[in-house]
Structures are given as structure tokens and as C-alpha cells.
Amino acid sequence: MLVPVYDIKNCGPRHRFSANGKLAHNSDNVNLQNLPRKSPLKYSIIAPDGYVVLDSDSSQIEARTLAWLAGQNDLVEAFDKGEDVYCIMASAIYGRQITKADERERFVGKTTILGSGYAMGAPKFKLQLKNFGVDVELDEAKRIIATYRATYPNIVRLWAEAGDMLRAMLRNAQTTLGRNGLLEVDGANGIKLPNGLYLRYPNLRLREDEKTGKVEVVYDTKKGKTVIPNRIYGGKVIENVCQALARIVIGEQMLMVAKKYRVVMTVHDAIAVVAPKAEAETAKEYVELCMRLRPKWALELPLNCESGYGDSYGDC
């Protein structure tokens, strides 16, 4: 097998590596999640002789977790049946049946599903669409956001519950959050996750914004050696929680996969393993089975995945 060779250069103080003249990496540390889909560096990560790299990506895990946690059962059911939720959202936005052939409209539906679940406002949504090459007026962005919230009211209700939870934490009161009271909350420790770890907001407090005069909830975060206040609100809490739950799911799946195949890395919501080339298809079936298995604490969570394998990580 011919192994490609790349002329890799360090182009700047933040380790902006280029490969054959194209930006391939931009970080102080290695971050495979930030590599472009066709980055040449992905093809430099190769399997040992006689093996393949198999990469399996959990499909829309945050959007699925959000729908499940909020009890938005129509969206959960659509995910569970394998329906095109992007077309469903786009159909609600445009008031007509949208199919995969309507690429622009479906893309707007996809961006809405994946981007609006954490209380994103219209200006930011408009900018997000523009970054992907779709330009809409602010009024149209407002209409799309309003349509999302009207279509999935339980998700909006979950943001409000998270806001109430923050106020309870400020009083050191105990409460619960999410489907069937899954998450136990108290002001002293934070939000207890299903694996027993806590999501914490150090020095949670009220603060008046100097510019707007509005009172907001903040907590302390570290930026280097500097401690700075960081604003927190209902939608942001739900983002933190959904990402934490998704990571727990991936972690449990990874442990199952590792019982049979060596896990070599994870990238966000994807697991990569090496498997003997002779049993590549068997390995693919096993990994997909593991990544569709629902955790005991979320038996209604509709998980799915996509996978592929090849001689290199890029071939996946």
C-alpha cells in the first residue's frame, strides 16, 4: 500500500499547521474534531498491516437527548422511526411538504433542529445560517425561531424549568430536572448526573449587568490564571446537561466496544477502533450494535449511528 507523504509546516504561534499548502490544523493542542472533513492529516492516521480503522459516529445525539429529556415525544418518535426530522422541521417552517430534493429548505430545517435547541435567539441564528451560505432577513430568522418553539413546546418548557432550577440553586434548595426527575439538583453540589458525577457552577450568584442594568445569574470560570464571571441561563444549562448526558452515553458504549475491539480514539460523538481486516464487516455490525444500545437510565432514548472503515482514518 502506498502511504501518502505530506509537507507539514508550522505556520504560526498557535500551531497553524498546513499540509501541502492547505490549512490542516489550528490549535495549541491536537484536536481532531477541528480537522476539515477532507483534511490530508486524516489520511496520515493509518491502520497497522492487516487491520482497518473503523469510525462510528452517533447520529444527532444531542438533538435526540434534548428531545428525550424534554419529553418532546413526537420528536422522539420521529427519531425512533428513522424519519427525516430535518424535513419535518422544514415543512413546519415553510408550510408545505419538504423532501430531500428541497436542499435549501431542508438545510434550514437541519440548522434549526441542531442549532435552536438551547434557546438561540434570531440574530445569532441568522448569523449561523449566513456562515453556511444561507442569507435570510432578521424577521425571517425570528419567524423560524418562533416556529421551532411553537412546534416543540416541551423543549421551551425545559429551558424554563432549568431557569427555575438555577433560582433554586441560589437558595440552596433541592429540586429535580428533566424527564421523570432524572437529574437531582441542590445548591451545594450542583446537578447530579446518572453516572454519579456532578455538573457544577462555582460561586453561583446574581449580578447586575453594567451595560443593560439587567440582573443575571453568573458563576466563576477560569481563563488561564484569571477567574472571570460567566453568564448562565436556562437554555445554556440544558446545553451543558445534554452534552454531559451524551458524553456519558458515548462513554458507556465505548466500554462495550472495547470488550471486543481496541478503541484508539474518540472525536466528540464518534468512536474509532482498529479491527482485523478479515472481520471488518463483523466489527462494523458489533460497533453499530453497541452504539444503538440504550442506557438503563434512558430506555426511551432513540439512539442511532453511522459507520465506515478503511485503511486510514480519512477513508472512513
Image (spheres, rainbow, N blue to C red):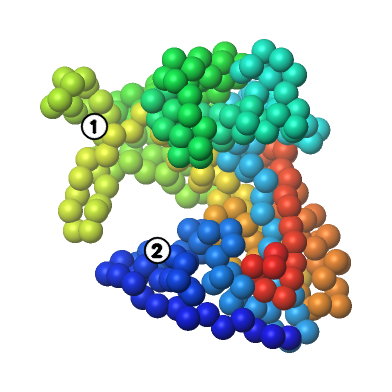
Which of the two residues, 282 or 293, is positioned nearer the viewer here? 282
Q: Residues within 10 Å of mark 2 (few under 14, many from 20)?
A: some
Labels in figure, total:
2
Q: Can residue 236 be seen here? A: yes
When asked about the image quadrant of residue 89, the answer is: top right
Residue type at the position of mark 1: Arg
The disc placed on residue 241 is: none
Q: Is residue 160 visible?
A: no
x and y, in percent, of residue 159 in the image: 46, 24
Q: Is residue 213 left or right of 309 when viewed as pictured?
A: left
Q: Give the x, y percent position of residue 150.
A: 57, 13
Mark 1 neighbour class, 10 Å CA radius: few under 14, some 14 to 19, many 20 or more = some
Callout 2: SS: strand
Whole-percent x, y for residue 181 in the image:
56, 29
| Residue at x 68%, y 79% (from the top left corner) | 47
Q: Nearer the viewer, residue 196 or 83?
A: 83
Quadrant for the N terminus, please. bottom right
Q: CA distance from mark 1 to mark 2?
A: 35 Å
Q: Is residue 16 left or right of residue 260?
A: left
Viewer-side residue, 48 vs 192 = 48
Q: From this viewpoint, which residue is outermost toward the left?
A: 210
For the C terminus, the quadrant is bottom right
Q: Nearer the viewer, mark 1 or mark 2?
A: 2
Tell me the SS state at disc 1.
strand
The quadrant holding residue 254 is bottom right
Q: Which residue is mark 2?
A: 26
Residue at left 79%, top 78%? 276
Q: Which residue is mark 1?
A: 205
Q: Earlier in the sequence, mark 1 or mark 2?
A: 2
> Compared with residue 215, is residue 50 higher up or lower down, i.e. above or below?
below
Query: Looking at this view, is 78 or 228 the one in front?
Result: 78
